[in-house]
Amino acid sequence: MITSKKLSKFKSITHGFFDRQKGTSRGIYKSLNCGLGSHDNKKKVLKNLKIVCKKIKCSPKNLILLNQIHSSKYYFINKKNKINKKFKGDALITNLNKVAIGILTADCVPILIYDKKLKIVSAVHAGWRGIYKKIVVKVIKFFKKKGSNLNDLTVSIGPCISQKSYEVKKDFITKFIKKDKKNKVFFKKVKNKTYFSLNKCVLYQLKKTGIKNIEIINKDTFTKDNNFFSARRSLLRKEIDYGRNISVIMIN
């Protein structure tokens, strides 16, 4: 498990960006696969989620995940919402104590957010579609509606596929530059190939909102040595599926 230096300063929350180690799954899912949507043995995935809960000291029934759809949709979970409700979207926000919210990734960008004054947390899943739709910007706008002062927010951008590992095609480049001309700086051409930086684009979007307290954890999920699940690496290996890494945050 990797923790954010900035978020670790707050004793009122527990968080973690989990890699694929110390779980129960086998084969291509070895070992801490937390993706119930994968083709892994469900019992093993549930055991893995219990391992995560034990690590962050949370009851398994209080761990809330999403059916992720690469959208800009988010949910605010409070006392009025049923904790066992199945959420379909890509970000969760809560002000409840001892309720852990999590998102799953396998190259996409996990983002954890904390308002130290209002005691609100968020977990955001941002793939390229979510970044294009500015999901993290929409989440920050929600924080502001709840009364957040941007100076009270701390954001940690977790491990994801790095620019050097993320080759993109011409239609992708055109789409992003048409959306915002300043997105040009997130592309890098090497010989005849073009590469895109997901986390730097997220950082740009966050800074544009006015947030200053932001951290990037530069760990490439594609690189085998970093022990993360990677959808792109699995695709190149022609594997039938891949595991999912989990990132969680909870108010103590």
Image (tube, rainbow, N blue to C red):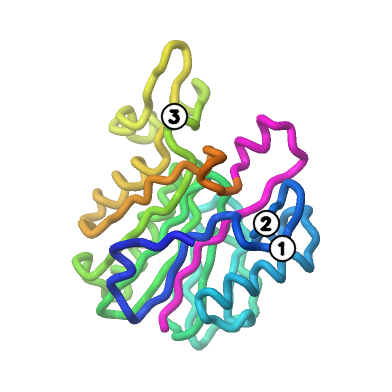
Residue 177: image x %, image y %? 37, 29
Depicted 89 relative to depicted 222: above or below: below
Give the tally of numbered discs. Answer: 3
Please indicate whether residue 184 sits to the left or right of residue 161 in the image: left
Asked if disc 2 and disc 1 are in contact, CB closer than 8 Å, the reply is yes
Residue 165: image x %, image y %? 49, 31
> Considering the image in quadrants, where does the C terminus appear?
bottom left
Which class describes the residues within 10 Å of circle 3: few (<14), some (14-19), or many (20+)? some
Span highlighted in magenta in the image? 230-252
Q: Amino acid type of disc 2?
A: Ser
Mark 1 secondary-structure assignment: loop
Circle 2 sits on which residue? 31
Q: Nearer the viewer, residue 224 or 154?
A: 224
Distance Cα–Cα, label 3 vs label 2: 26 Å
Mark 3 secondary-structure assignment: helix
Does label 2 or label 1 sit earlier along the sequence?
1
Residue 242: image x %, image y %? 69, 46
Residue drawn 64% across the image and 59% down it: 32
Tell whether position 238 is magenta: yes
Does label 3 or label 2 sit earlier along the sequence?
2
Please indicate whether residue 159 sits to the left or right of residue 20 in the image: left
3 vs 1, front mark = 1
Q: Amino acid type of disc 3?
A: Lys
Does label 3 or label 1 sit earlier along the sequence?
1
Circle 3 sits on which residue? 164
Which class describes the residues within 10 Å of circle 1: few (<14), some (14-19), or many (20+)? some
Quarter of the image where one finds residue 60: bottom right
Circle 1 sits on which residue? 24
